[in-house]
Amino acid sequence: MFSLLRSLNVLLLPFLVALLPSLASGQQYEGETIPNSLPSVPGSELAYIKITDPKGSGSNLTLTNYISHNSAGDRVDGSSTKRAVIVIHGAERDPGTYMSNLLSALSQVPNSDVDFDSVAICAPYFPNRNDKTTGYPWDHLPKHAANLIAGHSLDGQFVNRYAAVGTELGLTTPISYWIGNPNSFVWFTTDRPLDDSDCSEYDVWRDGFTNYIEINTYGDAIVEAGRDAVLARYNSRSIAYGRGVQDLGDTSSTCAPGTTGGNRNERFFNFIKAFPPSCPNPGVVGPCSTIDYVQAGHDASVMFASSAGQDRLFLDNFNGTGDIAFDFGYPRRQTGDDPYPNSALNGTASTGPTVYYAGNMSYYGCFTDQDPRSLTYTAYSSISNTIGLCTSTCNDAGYTIAGMEYGSECYCGAPLT
Ligand SMILES: *[C@@H]1O[C@H](CO)[C@@H](O)[C@H](O)[C@H]1NC(C)=O
Ligand SMILES: *[C@@H]1O[C@H](CO)[C@@H](O)[C@H](O)[C@H]1NC(C)=O
Ligand SMILES: *[C@@H]1O[C@H](CO)[C@@H](O)[C@H](O)[C@H]1NC(C)=O
Ligand SMILES: *[C@@H]1O[C@H](CO)[C@@H](O)[C@H](O)[C@H]1NC(C)=O
């Protein structure tokens, strides 16, 4: 069996990014250091940012946050920064992995003025109760963790919802949203493409808006304005969708996502069919929503480091001129942009073309690693890691399986028998 094995226990869930193509100014206060055992990520540090309680109750919060370093190994100097990338981790709550993946993707951008000095990356940490002693000691939970989670409805599909109901940040610099392989999208109408008769909660928040106002204190005025207004607001955003064409998974915990598609592949196409992204002229500054198709499964490291990922995350509108780096995206709906373009094939999951790497390896899927490791040979750990490099290294060393973890690590093994 020739295969590319990804032994990942960290990238099975959606991952999302918001982009701010240049920093306003660092209006943050130093927060309280929260003891934790989050991993150190070379090229970044853990910083603690104070957030003033928006309800004014005098109980400030501290956000634990990875921030990238510049080429000198110091905190990035805001005056030389042209872009900030804020990456929101998935349900595994592993911001260090996302920081590592984005540092790797940034290091691979061929444009020499796009580097660790001109781009700042931050990966905030939204812990939950499973993170005691990892993300915070017991006595910090109510103050630092629970309040934050409630405010952000921690979920891998955060950015799609944030683009819909998020508060205007009032920045003078444009903001873009990058949405990669979400498990579900918030739906802006009450109808669904698939049967919802067995799913009474199909339209509850976060899959719809039915009970939004009862359960949220954030964004109520936006939702009260009605679904058309929320959709118009969403459409006024600049959103880049990244679609891993081999991502056919499903990590739903309720029946609601299933009313928009049987898996992530179907949900993506049904969503863009119902709420088409638009970009009439990608050369003009303004809301421009694009779609990129990437040869990848549900794998953040590959999505970020792909050509489309590099272009959307780091290059588009880098100089503020509205330039789009490469003609991957803008409205690309075309015949066949459907998981089942031939209705006779309904229910037959499509796989997309296969890419072959060194040693004729091809993508096999996401797997959970264990101790001792499933892939016995540790090839290297490098932020310059790519699928091509890892597969060729393993192939050269005589192995037939290659696996990547945390974006930077490459492991090799013999075929499973
Ligand atoms: C919260 O932070 C603000 C800004 O730093 C500060 O003025 C205020 O005193 C803080 N409140 C508490 C209760 O620490
Ligand atoms: C930004 O503008 C400079 C000067 O025109 C150019 O050399 C550079 O390639 C541009 N960078 C990007 C990422 O577009
Ligand atoms: C396949 O799905 C499409 C879209 O949901 C539907 O219009 C069509 O009737 C289905 N075809 C079959 C054979 O079930
Ligand atoms: C690579 O693998 C594919 C699928 O197993 C096979 O069809 C193809 O012949 C292989 N190519 C080479 C050069 O071995």
Image (cartoon, grey):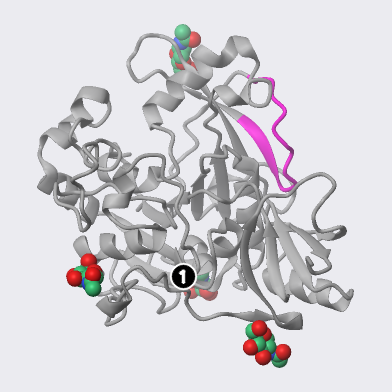
Quarter of the image with the C terminus in it: bottom right
| Left or right of 378, for residue 284 | left
Q: Nearer the viewer, residue 275 or 32?
A: 275
The quadrant in which residue 269 appears is bottom left
Q: Nearer the viewer, residue 171 or 350?
A: 350
**In what element is the residue under mark 1?**
loop
Residue at 65 percent of width and 16 percent of height: 137
Question: Eyeballing the image, is 218 above or below 304?
Answer: above
The quadrant in which residue 204 appears is top left
Residue at 55 percent of width and 15 percent of height: 141
Quarter of the image with the N terminus in it: bottom right
Question: Eyeballing the image, is 376 above or below 10?
Answer: below
Write the start and end of the magenta stretch as one range: 33-47
Question: Eyeballing the image, is 257 above or below 167?
Answer: below
Residue at 10 percent of width and 40 percent of height: 226
Give residue 111's position: percent from left, percent from top. Answer: 59, 72
Residue at 46 percent of width and 15 percent of height: 60
